[in-house]
Image (cartoon, rainbow, N blue to C red):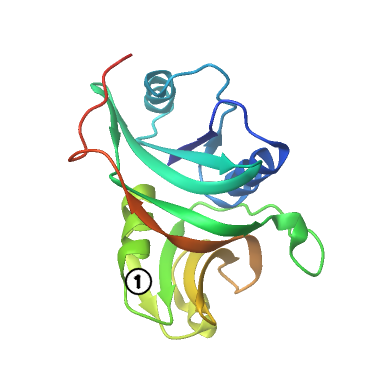
Amino acid sequence: MILITSSRKPSRRTRSLMRDLSHVIPRALRINRGKSSLWDLAQTAISRGMGRILVVWERKGNPRSFVFYRASLAGVIPVRRAIYFNSVRLRREIPGGRPRRVEADTIRLARMGGPIDRVTAVLAEGFGLSPVEIGGPSEIRELDCDVVLLDRNVGEERELTFFTADGVEVGPTMRVGGVFEFGGEGKLLPKD
């Protein structure tokens, strides 16, 4: 489904977030980037049957944003919008102990507490999912999937978190700061 990587020298916390994401997103592959270019990452993704790349960027040692790319034989095409975070809570920080690793084949993106908007649209495009609107947590069980990426309002803030099909929060959880746009019209990036 998606290749997950980071900036070139990730902090321990960013590596933990990448590991957490790979444990809850079906068929996700986590790769330590090292000196690999985006082109190299695209070739790895394509060779493993994945058409998308998620790069977790950080600031001052903390995971700060998700930047998505589409991988093709021609190169790497950036998704023109990214999501940045105010804070991140790792799976081990969820109250009640560390959640189990999720064995999943399917994932859905659900928006709760408001209409589908820019944040949800970026997630949908980045992960290649079709978003659905739900009215409350009880509706998670009605979605036909193993894992739900839930986009919800918590007070005045926006939160992204992962739930199992039976409604158990398994994290990680990200408090959304907003969406930023960059680059041109999704132009193909050159090989080097």
In the rendered view, tell whether residue 126 sits above or below residue 175: above
In the rendered view, tell whether residue 138 sits above or below residue 17: below
Residue at 53% across, 34% down: 5
Q: Amino acid at mark 1?
A: Val
Residue 96 position, x and y percent, is: 81, 69
Is 99 placed left or right of 81 in the picture?
right
In the rendered view, tell whether residue 47 sits above or below residue 133: above
Residue 158 position, x and y percent, is: 49, 71
Q: Nearer the viewer, residue 82 or 165?
A: 82
Residue 112 position, x and y percent, is: 44, 78
Is 92 placed left or right of 49 in the picture?
right
User: Label 1 belongs to which residue?
Assistant: 132
Tell me the crowding category of disc 1: few under 14, some 14 to 19, or many 20 or more residues within 10 angstroms, Cα based: some
Give the farthest residue toward the right.
97
Residue 58 image-quadrant placement: top right
Q: Nearer the viewer, residue 85 or 97?
A: 85
Give the farthest residue toward the left.
185
